[in-house]
Amino acid sequence: MLECREITKTYGRKTAVDHVSLQIQPGKIYAMLGPNGSGKTTLMKMAVGLVKPTSGGFYYNGQPVGQNSRREIAYMSTEPYFYSWMTVGDVGKYYKDFFEDFSEKKYEGLLKRMELTPDLKAKALSSGMMAKLKIAVTMARNARVYLLDEPLNGIDLLARDDIIASVIEAAEQDVSLVISSHLVDELERVADEAIFMKESRLVDVCGVEELRMTKGKSVVERYREIYGHGGEQTWEN
């Protein structure tokens, strides 16, 4: 289980994440929702140790995140992070050198599904093709937790369903998937839980099916309630 406890991150006078406590359970898909600047990316980066919290902590199976947890948590960032000289094939070799759980066979299968070939130059890829490459190389790891930051950016409407299906199929049973996106309706179809971030704080966490059954609302409707004009104040957990 991945858990953060009263975690806060500040940059000078700016607060990027403000006293957030959250538990990510195995076997569930989480949609992390919120506008730009709400703290989603910073929260994910702290979960993998790329950003150090100002206070509070992130824990994996009860232990502070660190070298051991990085072996089981796979993170896909929004930024391009491949060298300009790399081909798609080189990207796989690069990951294999860094991560013992990287599966070349799984990577090859994902590349075929994403319609990418190993000889393509990474720097020549379109934004949509780069998004597919980042998803393929991240999901080729046999991790226990996958954190995907805006994986659908640049991917056209017709390809999104196939990409989401590829992500879910690549993840084995009992793993956790946390996917951030502005495309709320796309994630609602597959998510078990919705996490709402607003102005650096956690606003709400709710089960997608429970939201429908008990309140008769969709995730899209809940999103409009929170982020629309006069939206709700921060949820205290």
Image (cartoon, rainbow, N blue to C red):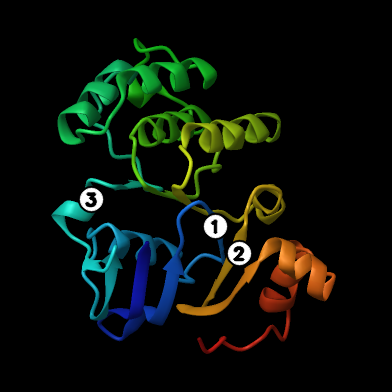
Q: Which residue is mark 3?
A: 70
Which quarter shows the N terminus? bottom left
Residue 42 located left or right of residue 159:
left
- List x then y, in percent, for residue 24: 44, 63
**Around disc 1, counting alpha carbons within 10 Å, would you say few (fewer than 14), some (14 to 19), or many (20 or more)?**
many
The answer to which of 128 and 62 lies nearer the viewer is 62
Amino acid type assigned to the residue bearing label 3 in the image? Arg
- List x then y, in percent, for residue 21: 41, 79
Residue 207 visible from this viewpoint: yes
Q: Residue furthest right?
A: 216
Give the residue at x 59% y 37%.
164
Q: Which residue is mark 1?
A: 30
Q: Earlier in the sequence, mark 2 or mark 3?
A: 3
Image mark for residue 67: none
Disc 1 element: strand
Residue 199 visible from this viewpoint: no
Disc 3 element: helix
Give the residue at x 55% y 38%.
168
Residue 234 located left or right of residue 15:
right
- List x then y, in percent, for residue 145: 38, 50
Residue 140 located left or right of residue 153:
left
Image mark for residue 194: 2
> In whole angstroms, how far apart are the C-alphas of marks 2 and 3?
24 Å
Q: Earlier in the sequence, mark 1 or mark 2?
A: 1
Amino acid type assigned to the residue bearing label 1 in the image? Tyr
Query: Dots 1 and 2: beta carbons under 8 Å?
Result: yes
The answer to which of 57 and 199 lies nearer the viewer is 57
